[in-house]
Image (spheres, rainbow, N blue to C red):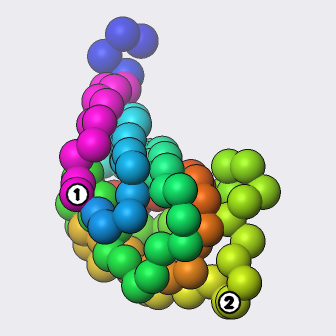
Amino acid sequence: MENFYTYREFNNYAQIKDVTSITARVYTVGNLAITSIIVETPKLIGKTTIKFPIKYKASPFVTFQDNDTASTPPGPLGINWTNLDSIEVQGFNGGFTMLVVGAI
């Protein structure tokens, strides 16, 4: 079982305007990658592209979780379709976590 999966952590792997930190934890099992990305921001972020720490073979499944009930902005949230290595978001107001699952 010790070689069943691999784990990697990426701290502040991308520079994003108005984001104070971005951390990713990547678990891989065979050709499947499960990535948790924690984004911390002290204020409302505009249209922003968030890079994944790894590249996927096909567009991955992405879901968002509000970390502290502060993500609710005064306007609508924008979550665009995923690319192989990023997703575009808009209107988040505080920290949030993304879960990204896909083939690598």
Residues drawn in magenta: 5-15
**Up-down relation of residue 9 to residue 90 (above or below):** above
Q: Position of residue 64 (x, y in %)?
A: 61, 63
Expressed as whole percent of the image width and height from the top left, the position of residue 16 reads 29, 63
Name the residue carrying label 2: 76
Q: Residue at x 39, y 58 (%)?
A: 19
Q: Is residue 58 visible?
A: no
Identity, as a three-letter code, of the amino acid under mark 1:
Gln
- Quarter of the picture holding the N terminus: top left
Tag 1 residue: 15
Does 99 appear in magenta? no
Establish if 81 lies above or below 54: below
Q: Answer with the quarter of the image where residue 52 lies.
A: bottom left
Q: CB of mark 2 within 8 Å of CB of mark 1?
A: no
Rendered residue at 56%/86% (across/down): 78
Q: Residue at x 72, y 60 (%)?
A: 70
- Which of the pair 71/27 is nearer the observer? 71
* Crowd band around label 1 with a 10 angstrom C-alpha radius: few (<14), some (14–19), many (20+): few
Q: Nearer the viewer, residue 28 or 52?
A: 52
104 or 22: nearer the viewer: 22
Point 27% across, 43% down: residue: 12
| Lateral position of residue 23 relative to residue 93, left or right | left
Q: Is residue 55 left or right of residue 78?
A: left
The answer to whether residue 61 is seen in the rendering is yes
Q: Mark 2 is on which residue type?
A: Pro
Q: Secondary structure at mark 1?
A: loop
In percent of width and height, residue 47 lies at 41, 85
